[in-house]
Image: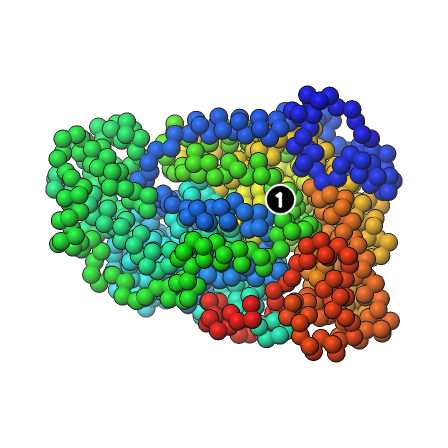
Amino acid sequence: MTKQVSLLELEQHELFLRRHIGPSDAEQAQMLDYVGAESLDDLTQQIVPEGIRLPTPLTVGESKGEAEALATLKAMADQNQVFKSYIGSGYYGTEVPSVILRNVLENPGWYTAYTPYQPEIAQGRLEAILNFQQLSMDLSGLDLASASLLDEATAAAEAMALAKRVSKNKKCNLYYIADDVFEQTRDVVINRAEHFGFEVKVGPAEDAKNHDIFGALLQYPNRFGEISDHSGLIAELKANKAVVAVAADIMALVLLKSPGSLGADVVLGSAQRFGVPMGFGGPHAAFFVTRDAYKRSMPGRIIGVSKDTRGNKALRMAMQTREQHIRREKANSNICTAQVLLANMASFYAVFHGPHGLRMIAERINRLTDIVAHGLKAKGVALANNSWFDTLTFTSDDKDAIVKRSVAAQVNLRLDSEGSLGVSIDETTTRDDVAVLFDVILGEGHGLEVASIDAELAEQGSNSIPAELIRDEDILTHPVFNSYQSETEMMRYIKRLENKDLALNHSMISLGSCTMKLNAGSEMIPVSWPEFANMHPFCPADQAQGYSAMINQLSDWLVNITGYDAVCMQPNSGAQGEYAGLLAIKKYHESRGEGHRNICLIPQSAHGTNPASAQMASLKVVVVACDKSGNVDMDDLRAKASELADNLSCIMITYPSTHGVYEEQVREICEVVHQHGGQVYMDGANMNAQVGLTSPGFIGSDVSHLNLHKTFAIPHGGGGPGMGPIGVKAHLAPFVAGHSLVKDGNASQDNGAVSAAPFGSAGILPISWGYIAMLGTKGLTQSTQVAMLNANYLTKKLSEHYPILYTGRNDRVAHECIVDLRPIKDASGVSEMDIAKRLMDYGFHSPTMSFPVAGTLMVEPTESESKFEIDRFVEAMISIKAEITKVESGDWPADNNPLVNAPHTLADIVDPAFDARPYDRQVAAYPVESCKLDKFWPTVNRIDDVYGDRNLFCSCPPLESYSGE
Ligand SMILES: *Cc1c(COP(=O)(O)O)cnc(C)c1O
């Protein structure tokens, strides 16, 4: 097995592969021997059905190695021209506080964590998100905030969906969008409305009251910078049973009266300018706040305060029964991965600056804007604004000359479709910048002096914000926003939270379907490069050539890897990719005069986002049964496809299936659906078992999303960022998402948008670019093979102690396996939950619990885990099995044993009452020797879910309850 590699080759092509893949060559040989395969290729032969094996290798090139890949990427980054941006429109320059850059964004303790489904080992990020909710509520003036959404535009679309759910104007189908809302927001909402089957009217805000509507979207300040008192309008709309959403600027809200106090029912917006770089469009978090009365209709996640078995404060995700994992096509939204890391950065920004710091930043922005306005007015420029916070709009006969001067000065102004020009000032703007702006707008020799205008304004004051709209209530009064203004304290606060969380930098997180693989340092580094981080998504295309080159190359590679013909980079998550893909299918049918096709077949085993996305595309979900080996029941599929053929739109399948096996009949599934006029959507979440060996396009599918945050090494960030680009066959390419502001790059600019930014979260694409560049054809293929080796090794080890639910040909699994715990529960009373919590005592995050089958754990080790770590996990599972046996045999009482009492905290261990337990402290906290390696202490005991939902509390709790930490 150990190959002879020349020294020079090792240097160039082998090193990164060896670092990305966990087991060494020698260990791989041992593991192959154990599972009964001659080689990786032999194992692949045994697992992957012959008929779908790619006949030739990928053509993504040779591995570049880390140094060369970084140098190549840097050369591309250098092709970007980072102009000073005054474009605004939802994206602003911001100073990422270094303490947050270094300790959060660039820290694997934060970026490699998973969504906090196991709250006892996630109290740190849960607290950071709770702070985000508190921040959102304080600024918006409403009482219930969600954790985070994908961007401002999709948050606005969610507000419309919420309005439809809660409006008392039940029969009405018309939604109103004010024409001064950001254009990208308007476009995404219109697109969403079209596919929900809502009608939309766009017009002047005040005109909304002349229509019979179920809801309306306003913006505050509007896209031209004007700040209007909408309270009268909102009251009138509400009197007519409309639900009113207000998109608002988070920084402006520091100084402005809250939209909630003006009567808004929903307040939403981007939190980008709170310390998250523009990144050519993302990733950024959106905030979403509404009334407590609408809590059951809320989209996305909500963090709530509950208590643990000791009665201590403990945080968790609340009211999950609203979400797609449980409600499927009846869910409020399809939101799964949702920008958590960026929400955390924004919340830390607020914690660090505190209310006074934020006010200073906002006032400074406003003052600089006042100076610009004052100067321009003095020189006779026609300002469109009567009021402003940071954005001015003006017209000029001299427009062409102004644009020319702006390019020369490396400055981007906003160029409106209406012909006007605009400037948005931000936190990074300086007095010198303003002087340059004067030169650009007025030409040399204007004679304006920033300092003297400033002095004048300081004396006479400014009334740029209407007096009746100046905020009159304090914000961020909670101690958490008033205690960490020194960098030392801030650093320690971040560290304190980090220490409560188990992330990949502690141990393996073998979450099935989530592919928690290595996010290599070399892949992550370019994310912070200013040439990528500080680009505005709507900057002129010629300034973004580096981004174009990188995105084009990545698209080409993904085309090669997926076997499709084109890739659309717009969706910000897997679920959003599903939505975008289904819309492409819908439009394709329409283009052929078959717009009536509205049935979406979905196998029982599908991920909850599949039916939730289908519902958003107004498709009717019909469930296809699975047989007892976990495969799609072909008879049922044939029967349904033929019975529903006239209206069949598509099927959504996952491959390898969520049951962790390569279904032999997958080509047949595609054929049956095609035969009846349907399209095949292949959920790409399991691409980690396909790359280099087979591909959705080769198998016969028409469209897939790729979770770049699973297979292609973007970290999970505690629940986002993500990227869910879709690959499509040529016939669907004309129907993928377009963008009205950025005309190139997407298949058709006329198609509706699914995200605010044309390339979604472009700022994290360098990670996936780096992953593919550094592994190359050989490394990618080998990664897939080792992912399967690791899974089969682990499965065989576990199968000696636990039943494995499904296996495919030759009794193999693909890249993950499902451990069936139902027989154990029947025999001993010990549940999958007890085992998940007990794993924490052993220092592990639980595998995926109860998906896709209730009462099971789904384990996916990925290629990045070493044999050492997999063996440690197996040791823990075997030890737990022995514990279960003791419960079963009655050695330990069913209601008092290390499993039902798990997880154990330090508080348990030092509690004298522990002596009364039927097991000792060693068993509780150090059940196996390897715990001593790096003991992880859960900071709370098991959390009471029912209590948390019954007593919903979603803001920062009073300080007293923080005791016991
Ligand atoms: C993760 C996952 C999704 C959803 O992807 P997000 O990026 O979280 O939106 C969909 N389907 C399957 C099978 C998944 O594992």
Can residue 742 be seen here?
yes
Q: Is residue 554 above or below residue 282?
A: above
Task: From the image, tell me which residue sits under label 1.
Answer: 710
In the rendering, at what x and y percent does residue 951 appear? Answer: 53, 74
Label 1 sits on what residue type? Lys
Could you tell me which residue is drawn at 56 percent across and 52 percent down? 718
- Residue 221 is left or right of residue 458, and the answer is right
Could you tell me which residue is drawn at 47 percent across and 34 percent down? 746
Mark 1 C-beta to ligand 1 under 8 Å: yes
Q: How many marks?
A: 1
Could you tell me which residue is drawn at 25 percent across and 56 percent down? 228
Q: Within 10 Å of the Cα at label 1, are there few (<14), some (14-19), or many (20+) other Cα atoms?
A: many
Quarter occupied by the C terminus:
bottom right
- Residue 212 is left or right of residue 890, and the answer is left
The picture quadrant where one finds residue 830 is bottom right
Q: Nearer the viewer, residue 409 or 441?
A: 409
Q: Nearer the viewer, residue 669 or 338?
A: 338
Task: State the scheme by which the image is colored.
Answer: rainbow
Q: Nearer the viewer, residue 965 or 645?
A: 965
Can residue 157 be seen here?
no
Could you tell me which residue is drawn at 43 percent across and 33 percent down? 531
Quarter occupied by the N terminus:
top right
- Residue 341 is left or right of residue 389, and the answer is right
In the rendering, at what x and y percent does residue 857 appear? Answer: 73, 57
In the rendering, at what x and y percent does residue 876 appear? Answer: 77, 57
Secondary structure type for disc 1: loop
In the rendering, at what x and y percent does residue 849 appear? Answer: 69, 58
The picture quadrant where one finds residue 880 is bottom right
Q: Nearer the viewer, residue 712 or 879?
A: 879
